[in-house]
Image (tube, helix red, strand yellow):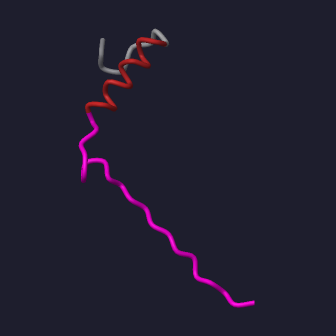
């Protein structure tokens, strides 16, 4: 049985193609409000 080498690729586009930091921040704020727990450093 011939062995086929495994191939793969990992791409991290965040900050390379798009900067999604603001969207991540907004999603954490929304979750925080929904579960009524403050984010660290938000007082």
Residue 30 percent location from the top left of the image: 39, 18
* Residue at 28% across, 38% down: 20
Q: Quadrant of residue 5?
A: bottom right
* Residue at 32% across, 53% down: 13
* Residue at 62% across, 84% down: 4
Q: Quadrant of residue 41?
A: top left
Q: Quadrant of residue 25?
A: top left
Residue 7 percent location from the top left of the image: 52, 74
Q: Nearer the viewer, residue 38 or 33?
A: 33
The correct choice, above or below, for 17 with respect to 10 in the image is: above
Residue 41 in the magenta stretch? The answer is no
* Residue at 41% across, 12% down: 33
The correct choice, above or below, for 8 with respect to 32 in the image is: below
Question: Mostly what secondary structure, the magenta segment?
Answer: loop
Return the residue found at the far top. 36
Give left or right: position of 3 versus 36: right
Return the residue found at the far right. 1
Residue 21 percent location from the top left of the image: 27, 36
Give left or right: position of 6 versus 43: right
Residue 9 in the magenta stretch? The answer is yes
Residue 14 percent location from the top left of the image: 31, 48
Give left or right: position of 8 versus 11: right
Of the 4 image quadrants, the one containing the N terminus is bottom right
The correct choice, above or below, for 2 with respect to 9 in the image is: below
Q: Nearer the viewer, residue 8 or 28?
A: 8
| Magenta residue span | 1-21
């Amino acid at each position: 049985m011939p062995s086929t080498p495994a191939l793969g690729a990992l791409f991290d586009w965040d900050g390379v193609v798009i900067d999604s930091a603001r969207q991540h921040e907004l999603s954490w704020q929304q979750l925080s409000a929904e579960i009524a727990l403050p984010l660290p450093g938000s007082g």
